[in-house]
Image (spheres, helix red, strand yellow):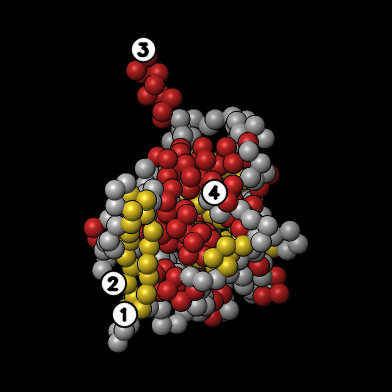
Amino acid sequence: MINELGLENFKSFSSENVEFSNLNILSGLNGSGKSSVIQALCVIRQSFDQNGISLVNLNGDLVTVGKGRDCLSDFADSDIVTIEVYDKTSSFILSFDGKSSLSSIKPTQPVLLEKIPEFFTGDFQLLVADRISPKTLYGQQDGSRYGTDYLGRYGEYSIDFLSKYGDRFVANSRRSEVEKRTSENRIRLLDAIIEWLQVVSPGVSLEVGEVGGTDNVSLKYRYEGVEALGVTNLYRPTNVGFGITYSLPIITSCLSISPGGTLIIENPEAHLHPRAQFEMGRLLSLVAADGVQLFVETHSDHILNGIRLAVKNGLITSSEVSLNYFSRSVEDGITQVENPVIKEDGKLNYWPDGFFDEWGRSLQKLLD
């Protein structure tokens, strides 16, 4: 697990260290530096996966940053961009020429592969903000350096993954309905996913399967327990709410990734109603408590509240959650990071200005 990320001369960062835990929330105004943290992590992961970091690959399967000069901060005091990651026992430094016009750049100092943290070798999933949308058919994975369990950065292989591995068993501790957990301590993956989807849309169920003679798989939904109907006919995703399909890769990745793995999610709240966003915060907490390291970029106070209540209810400890609030100084434009702490009772030790406080601001204006 990565405990800390150091960024020097990288984009809006002059020199900043960001501390991490199991569940890491990245929040802040647009353009404040949240995505840059994710890009930095993805650059070093894709460079390792593509060439063992003999080159720094700024463009690849995970992220497209551009060229070296696109990474160099406007506030840099040198031409060298440095990304450094720390785990409990070692650190790993990756530096490159920020003036380079190339997208694959030779590191400016030798890379010591024996110091590679588990982040670079364990299970890995990245889900970007513009995920799969409802379609009639979805493609199959034809091989990936991240393995057969890789869902794709858009979640485009989620349906194919479920058609092949939906009968796998997953940790019972990640189930949506606590009262249904059994002593067997496991549940079929597809059943667990349906339980969480029913938080998004009550009664929904799904069916997946290969389309014979093609390289496609199909996804269909039905509703169970509908009064006077019992069970409805199967529906195409294009005829069902957008948020159900949009959240499916997130739920699938959360339930299928192994302890010790890394999961990066951008905007898990997209297209979800407030209650579903709140429950998404609870799901993220359960997965992190089960040993997965998550990096979640979000603008949702409902997700934050779901995590706060998960701490209060003992589903995850306060020390396993790291809140990172990014802002850019008006004076110099440099990104700064603040770290409010969720206390054991679910309250925060302090609220930085601009940190999920718009509801309070609006309410005060309504009361004035």
Query: Residue tagged by mark 4?
Result: 177
Crowd rating for badge 1 (residues with CA inside 10 Å; few <14, some 14–19, many 20+)? few
The quarter of the image holding the C terminus is top left
Query: Residue tagged by mark 2?
Result: 137
Label 4: element kind: loop
**Residue 192 sits above or below residue 107 on the image:** above
98 left or right of 4 in image: left
- Of the pair 86 and 140, the residue shown nearer to us: 140
Residue 141 in the image: state x and y as whole percent.
41, 78
Earlier-in-chain disc, 2 versus 3: 2
Cα distance in 3D space between marks 3 and 1: 60 Å
Q: Residue 368's mark?
A: 3
Instruction: Identify the residue at horizontal 29%, vertical 52% (top origin).
Output: 229
Q: Amino acid at mark 2?
A: Leu
Q: Amino acid at mark 4?
A: Glu
Query: Residue tagged by mark 1?
Result: 211
Q: Which callout, 2 or 4, points to the residue nearer the camera?
A: 4
Earlier-in-chain disc, 2 versus 4: 2
